Image (spheres, helix red, strand yellow):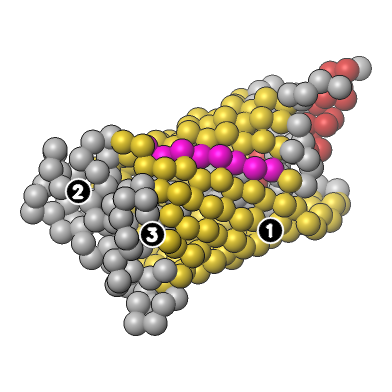
Amino acid sequence: MRKFFMLLAMICTGMAAGAQELYVNTEPASNMPANSLGIRVTNKLFPMDHADYTGYRMSPEVMLGLSKKLMVHASGYFSNMMQRQFEFEGASVYAKYRFLSKDDVHSHFRMAAFVKGALINNPYYPVMGAGHNHNAKPYFNEELDLEGSSSGVSGGVIATQLLHKLALSGTLGYDRYFKNVKDDMPLFFSKNALNYSLSAGYLLLPRTYKSYKQTNLNLYVELLGKSNLDQYRRKHYVDVAPAIQFIFNSTTRIDLSYRTQLFGDMERNMTTTYLVRLEHNIFNIRKK
């Protein structure tokens, strides 16, 4: 009987129910279950467009489900992209609050608001040397982010619709960038940006749920865009990111994703990203 209620709770609120909502490059409006802990490590490889090396960034992350409506993330960033060696780049904190939930049989609709703050100690120009080509030309970069590139804050809204095995989600957010710990922001960088995304996830396996121990196979495709807002610096891009995801025992997931630019006029250090992520979730971390 106890196992039955645990399974029922996971199907209603956990990874088993909305597996196709666990997007790889964005967050859904749904939250992780209350009283749960998630630990993930994200690895990204970036072939640099203006240099002859591949950048690598590792991001360890801790996630807490504080309630059914509120969850928080804390992330660290380590990379060799902007500095000579593999170094600590900074950290960020993310919070998401689900303020709307409409449930039906095999479907639901969620809306959530999110905020994020990042403190980064990277230089804005890559430091050449120690394996980086001195003739590289990365200085035309017009793209900033809060995942190791720039300090700043972000906020926005997310809407997610689950329709049986298909989940659709959209995000609209605003980024405000500040100076980094080690460096002032160059004058030609846009301090304000609009980011937006459209994501789709499909639960391919299992065909029918019989146990929370069944392996889930999810397929995703996401459109990820950004537009700089400052006058005379209004450039934009839209990327596409297909992904595949495996979930084991409703607690452990592996994500594999490829991201590349579809169109845009923004100068960027890299337009292609390879992602490998490992995540593990622990439920009922505080025993009643």
Secondary structure under the numbered disc 1 in the rendered image? strand
Label 1 environment density (alpha carbons within 10 Å; few <14, some 14–19, many ≥20): many
Q: Amino acid at mark 2?
A: Val
- Reading the image, the residue beneath label 3 is 179
Relative horizontal placement of residue 68, taking residue 195 as reference (left or right): right
Label 2 environment density (alpha carbons within 10 Å; few <14, some 14–19, many ≥20): some
Whether residue 110 can be seen here? no
Q: Do residues under tags 2 and 1 come within 8 Å of each other at their CB atoms?
A: no
Secondary structure under the numbered disc 3 in the rendered image? loop
Which residue extends farthest right? Answer: 1
Q: Earlier in the sequence, mark 2 or mark 3?
A: 2
The residue that appears at 37% across and 42% down in the rendered structure is 89
Q: Position of residue 247 (x, y in %)?
A: 60, 30
Q: Do residues under tags 2 and 3 come within 8 Å of each other at their CB atoms?
A: no
Front residue of 263/163: it is 263
The residue that appears at 52% across and 58% down in the rendered structure is 153
Q: Position of residue 120 (x, y in %)?
A: 40, 48
- Reading the image, the residue beneath label 2 is 127
Q: Magenta span covers which residues? A: 71-78
Of circles 2 and 1, the one toward us is 2
Of circles 1 and 3, the one toward us is 3
Up the image or down, 210 lies above or below 66; here it is: above
Q: Quadrant of the N terminus?
A: top right
Dominant secondary structure of the residues highlighted in magenta in the image:
strand
Q: Amino acid at mark 3?
A: Lys
- Reading the image, the residue beneath label 1 is 113
The residue that appears at 14% across and 38% down in the rendered structure is 130
